[in-house]
Amino acid sequence: MSVPHPTLNRRSFLMASAAFAVTIFDRPERAQAQSIQGLKGLNAPFEVLEDKWGIPHVKAGSIADAYFANGYLVAKDRLWQMDFSHRQSLGRLAEVFGEAFVASDVANRLFLFRGDADAELAAYHSTVQDAAQAYVAGINAYIRSVKDNPEHLPAEFSIFKYEPLEWSVRDLVRIRAEVTGNTELEIRRARLAARDALSYDSFVTPLQPAYTPQPLPGLDVHSFSEQDLGHLGVLQQRLPLGEIRAATLQGDPSHRKNNEGSNSWVVASDRTATGRPILANDPHLAFGAPGPRHVIHLTAPGLDVIGAGSPGMPGVMQGHNDHIAFGRTNFHIDQEDLFILRTHTNDPSRYWHRGKWRKMQEEIVRIAARNSEDQSVTLRFAAQGPVISEDPERSRAVAVSATWLYPGANGLLANIGINLAHDWTSFREALRAHTSPTNFTYADGQGNIGWHAAGGLPQRAEQHDGMMPAPGDGLYDWEGLQPMDNLPSSFNPANGWFGTSNQMNLPSGYSQTNRKVSYEWSEPFRYERVAQVLDATSHGTVQDSADLQHDTVSQLALQVIKLLPEQSEGTKFAYQLLKNWNGKIDHDSPAAALYEVWWTHLCVAIHAAIIPSELHDLLPAPLSPSVQLALLQSPEKHFGNNAQSVRDEILSRCLQKAVSELTSRLGALPASWKWGALHTVTLGHVLGNLTSIQNAFPNIGGENYGSGGDPYTVMARWYNPYHTSQNPYATTGGASFLMVCDVGSWDNSLFLNFPGQSADPMTGNYSDFFEPWLKGDMQPLYFSWSNIKKHTVRHYFFRP
């Protein structure tokens, strides 16, 4: 069953226990305050005004109490989502879901921080420490309230018969596993080098700036296999659910990694209609129910911040306070390197390093597994970092260095400092605690705009570029992390705007020689369209930026269509349909449907023409879209004799296949070929193939709800045509949270948070953003208390 709104949509409901009573009212004037008492860890009462979307606006007496409210309220809305993620990060899934999760637990235990957690926490300003302690106390206060009344726990806990974990602030320091680097590609390049086929790697992952990697001296490229990723590979795989083999969690990791990104731009005051800066941000993540972001407004003396956060991470990730607005997209830093250790023939726990045999550090952990005996596992650590795989028969092991394992890299607390920043200087200072590779966009009430890249940047040995594994004998070990000032930034750029869509954005003249930030970047097509529109807009408005976030013009499609040769009678109508098209990937467009199916067949055909069949195991389809476009535009370089004729034959043959597929799927009449009929939106619970979950969490959307966009339009909406399913064109991810800030006139800001604020279908905020999101109908993000009070539908007081 798929529905646009939950079937259990009660106008009023009672949540829980003597400590928690809530009533929903139809009109603000009827929103009488409810009182929640006895909250351990809270210093003084705080007040919450909640609007119809379920967005809580918090008034607290101190910054710490505001973050207590943050923890409490996000747990109220997203407890199971938070608990699952927390258990996964701590390596405690098997105790609930069974033996199939032991491998995940071992991998996550291996990557917990092993240093002094108290010292890590103490390195923060006392305000941040207090806020972090309070956030965890707020989560635990809510958990205790529902543990006392287990009938009010989220349905997942009763279905699987377990309780949520209570949290410790040390966990926010210990949890580190954040795989962002290119270790899979390191191994792929080594294996290609072993086959004398390294040149083919650039067809799939073109390097920017142009670069030719080479194996380091002493590296045996013939020794590699997929097994070398070991525990690190487990973190990048799907999670099985016990004995039910079909059940998986979190979708296809490689598909997500290839598509995840964001758009963000800032426009200076002299290029807007109001004379105030505009900041826009729409992070692109996998779709699901609940969504990846939770929206909240926190106020206290010295704090007034609103925006979206990640459940389980204190504070606001994308939003604004009363001084500055801030957004983010993925920057690209190669933050992980593999090191190949030579181990002792008689003792595989010893390895050769800097001229002598060294003993690996060892830690024995016990993994509890539901309905199975506990398992004892030995974790090993070398000088470079955790040992992820071992092959004693070949006297070989693999260790990994990762920026996020270094002291000071406890990035889960980074939002707090950003939320408290009030100008460019304090904002930049707060970014020093942010270790995930990120483009931060910035605008302030004084009219300034800026961009700063942040994240842990390794200091590699001179000869080591991070593109392939390195010998682990000590010659290529990292020498710590580089200072954030070595990353690029821009303040008040001369052209009056700055945009980032994950494209290669290292400034002209920026040297990679010593910094070695990255050579691997996302496709440029979204950014090119943003630049085209912003360059042409001299007096932009908030609505203009909201429209641009929903822009469906495909720069890629328009360039590919130019190359299509005139067709014979059988497909002449398809040729005309594409040639007369405006390039907009709209949900009701027949041409968009034809193009997307044609492009999918082109990807397969070009891959087959370029990549030798004996390399398909290492380089599966597709090639990089920008590479494919270049191949089509200059076929003489790779299609051999009669290159243009070969290219034209591929284009025509794939168009015929697209017409045949669309006829089969949607009928013979082109008028019925709507992109949205293929690019449908269905959101389900991550465990939604289980009947008990399906009954408690009905799907949102369904086959009657179609979307425009594709992975390369500004309105990014991914699909996975290489996944075996009934509909390979179904929407799998994109922007679920969208925000446009009118900097300094904050009540004019707009947002969406798809599908809804709550993870509970029993509430009205489970899927209420579905239809506005589908229509691109951005909603006001009210910030002033006069406007907040006008739109309040629920009112609470929370007391110690």
Image: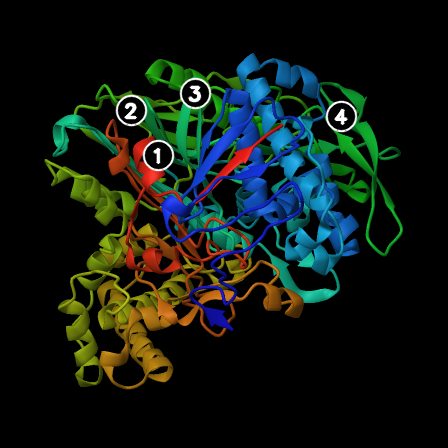
Tag nearer the camera, 3 or 4: 3
Residue indicated by mark 3: 420
Measure the alpha-carbon separation of dots 1 and 2.
24 Å
Tag nearer the camera, 1 or 2: 2
Q: Are marks 3 and 1 in contact (CB under 8 Å)?
A: no
Mark number displayed over residue 450: 2
In this rendering, would 448 be left or right of 599?
A: left
In this rendering, would 178 be left or right of 100?
A: left
Estimate the x, y position of residue 607 in percent, counting from the top left: 41, 62
Q: Could you classify mark 1 by the number of other residues whose Cα lies within 10 Å: few (under 14), some (14-19), or many (20 or more)?
A: few
The local secondary structure at tag 2 comes to strand
Q: Earlier in the sequence, mark 4 or mark 1?
A: 1
Estimate the x, y position of residue 737 in percent, counting from the top left: 39, 46
Estimate the x, y position of residue 376 in percent, counting from the top left: 87, 42
Measure the alpha-carbon separation of dots 3 and 1.
36 Å
The local secondary structure at tag 1 comes to loop
Measure the alpha-carbon separation of dots 3 and 4.
48 Å
Give the position of the C terminus as an image quadrant: top right
Residue at coordinates 38% horizontally, 31% vertically from top-left? 439
Residue indicated by mark 1: 209
Tag nearer the camera, 4 or 1: 1
Mark number displayed over residue 68: none
In this rendering, would 469 be left or right of 114?
A: left
Residue at coordinates 65% horizontally, 57% vertically from top-left? 155
Q: Earlier in the sequence, mark 3 or mark 4?
A: 4
User: Does residue 431 appear in the picture of this structure?
Assistant: no
Measure the alpha-carbon separation of dots 2 and 4.
47 Å
Under mark 1, the amino acid is Pro
- From the viewer's perspective, is residue 118 above or below residue 53? above
Mark number displayed over residue 352: 4
Q: Could you classify mark 4 by the number of other residues whose Cα lies within 10 Å: few (under 14), some (14-19), or many (20 or more)?
A: some
